Amino acid sequence: MKRPGLLRRSWPWLVGLAIIAIIARSVPVDAFREAMTKGPHVLLALVTLAITATVLLTDSFSTWVGLAAIDIRRPLSRVLAVRGATYVLFLINYALGQGAFGYYLNRTGVSGLRAVGVTLFLMGTNLATLLVVTTVAFAIDGGGSQPALWWTLLIGSAAFVVYLVVIVVAPGFLARRKVLAPLFEAGLRGHAIAMVGRLPHTAIIVLGYWVAIRVWGIEVPLWAGITLMPAVAIASVLPISPAGLGTTQAALVYFCSPFAAGATVDERNAQVLAFAVVYFVYAVAAYLVVGLVCTPLAKRLGVMPTAQPVPAEVPG
């Protein structure tokens, strides 16, 4: 009985590692090893920690704005502490980290199904902001260089428009369900407020990837970074592997290899893959540091409550 449980816990990591292994098959070992050895590790580690701290600040502010958009008021300092404490869980799965914040809402007065709905609202507006920013960037750039991604973005944007139409129409069989109530209560105005509030966080994520890859020595131009890195950010939150393992590295290699040094495509892929792997390791370490700092802070502030959760309503 223990083996299936271990397999269920391990398979997301195995999926991520399998993706990296597939990419690495065509990468020259010597070029990869040289890139790993010569890279500015100390500088990248410090930059990664600074980026992660800034991501936390903007993420907390964006979450605070999103909560306010649906009339849930929490002090920004407490949102910051709890959000930072959940960053360790983001290393397992993006949705798990978001779900932990929903659990905090439940423990501090928001009923069970409503807390789930609020979590869906925060996750949805985060992903929608990334989608809109990526689509706009590709539209300005012409979208011709990545036709498959361009059509994927257009389909995703069309689906988001359909979702907004449903929010406006608010069909009773959906709007009456307590788990979906926060989405309909927010309306177009609440969604717009939450997405505008999410822009600083999105900007830091996008610029963070660009700054980090430049620090490593891969000369990605600013406009290319603004255009391509939102797609990398979307890949990083796909719920198929922990912390974007595999998907993020694949996206970075796919989009950024043309800007790397190397006589062949495989050598350029080796340069970017080395950066992507090292940056992932340092990002994991930075998230652990943030989580270890914020968890005791959250406890001191009393925002890791001992009260029993508010019971969930009967679905309806």
Image (cartoon, helix red, strand yellow):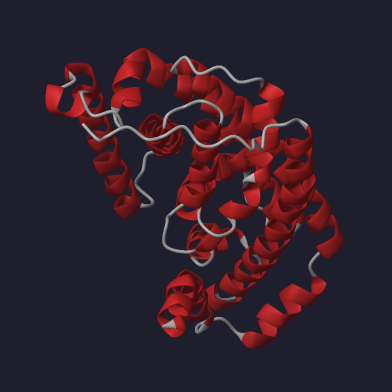
Q: In the rendered view, tell whether residue 217 sits above or below residue 21.
A: above
Residue 212 at x, y = what percent? 70, 52
Residue 23 at x, y = what percent? 49, 76
Q: In the rendered view, tell whether residue 170 sits above or below residue 128.
A: above
Q: In the rendered view, tell whether residue 233 sits above or below residue 218.
A: above
Residue 132 at x, y = what percent? 40, 33
User: What residue do we see at 54% from left, 48% from top?
Assistant: 97
Q: In the displayed structure, does residue 188 sit left or right of residue 112?
A: left
Viewer-side residue, 281 vs 300 = 300
Residue 298 at x, y = what percent? 73, 37
Q: In the displayed structure, does residue 160 sit left or right of residue 284?
A: left
Q: Quadrant of the N terminus?
A: bottom left
Q: Quadrant of the C terminus?
A: top left
Quadrant position of residue 60: top right
Quadrant position of residue 154: top left
Residue 73 in sight in this render: yes
Q: In the rendered view, tell whether residue 234 sits above or below residue 190.
A: below
Quadrant position of residue 223: top right
